[in-house]
Image (cartoon, helix red, strand yellow):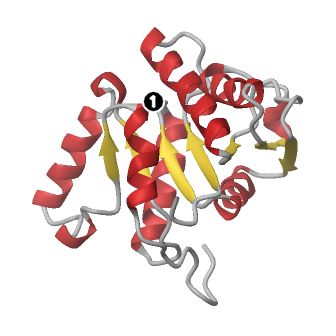
């Protein structure tokens, strides 16, 4: 794999979700462990976030959770992680997750997932990093987002040369082959930090 030793997932903390989304989370966690790729995630035990971490841990994977102290009780901090890091703020959480990761994968989620995803895409757009960003469009969940991005581009709010900042895939099995095929990139621009 092209210098990909750790992958950050952004995904939902809701437990009342489609079975196919839960299955994709489990599949991805197990796949990362099988490939020896560390999982970096939001540190919660709940929702598909927790399912991904549990699957990676069951398969012997290395799992790093990053959670702000004030969310630890709300999201039931995943204390069985290989490593659980605590931050003070949400911004510190996102920064720490980004710093620990070589690539980003977005699974289905809600407002928090969108917040994390848009921030990391914006950082890439601003050349603060060159890490791959992949959206797992399980059962077409992210189709409305794809349509919105196309609309924003057609209205000239997203430059056409930025259309390749995100890669959409339709199933978990596509993610690692895409990452393996990518040439090595400079992951951080020297002297800059988000």
Q: Position of residue 27 (x, y in %)?
A: 54, 25
Measuring from the top left, give residue 115's x and y in whole percent.
51, 47
Mark 1, Cα crowd under 10 Å, few <14 / some 14-19 / many 20+, is: many
User: Taking 129 as reference, is 61 left or right?
Assistant: right
53 vs 177: above or below: above
Vertical comparison of 48 with 82: above or below: above
Tag 1, which secondary structure?
loop
* Residue at screen point 15% across, 50% down: 151
> Mark 1 highlights which residue?
108
Q: Is residue 156 above or below residue 188?
A: above
Residue 18 pos. (x, y %): 45, 11
Give the percent coordinates (x, y) of residue 186.
52, 79
Q: For this rendering, which residue is in front, 7 or 109?
A: 7
Task: Please identify the quadrant where the C terminus is shown.
Answer: bottom right
Residue located at (24% from left, 50% from top) = 149
Residue positioned 41% across, 48% down in the render: 177
Indicate the quadrant where residue 91 lies.
bottom right
| Left or right: where 129 falls relative to 154 | right
Residue in view at x 55 percent, y 74 percent? 187
Q: In the image shown, does 129 or 93 lie closer to the viewer?
A: 129
């Amino acid at each position: 794999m092209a210098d990909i030793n750790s992958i950050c997932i952004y995904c939902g903390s809701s437990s009342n979700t489609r079975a196919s989304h839960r299955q994709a989370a489990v599949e991805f966690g197990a796949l990362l462990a099988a490939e020896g790729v560390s999982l970096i995630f939001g540190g919660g035990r709940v929702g598909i976030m927790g399912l991904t971490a549990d699957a990676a841990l069951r398969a012997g994977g290395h799992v790093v959770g990053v959670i702000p102290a004030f969310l630890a009780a709300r999201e039931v901090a995943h204390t069985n992680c290989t490593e659980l890091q605590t931050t003070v703020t949400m911004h510190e959480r996102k920064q720490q997750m980004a710093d620990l990761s070589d690539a980003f994968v977005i699974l289905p989620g809600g407002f928090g997932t969108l917040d994390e995803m848009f921030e990391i895409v914006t950082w890439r757009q601003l050349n603060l990093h060159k890490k791959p960003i992949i959206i797992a469009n399980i059962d077409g969940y992210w189709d409305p987002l794809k349509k919105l991005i196309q609309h924003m581009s057609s209205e000239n709010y997203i430059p056409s040369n930025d259309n390749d900042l995100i890669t959409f895939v339709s199933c978990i099995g596509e993610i690692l082959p895409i990452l393996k095929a990518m040439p090595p990139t400079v992951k951080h621009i020297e002297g800059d930090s988000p």
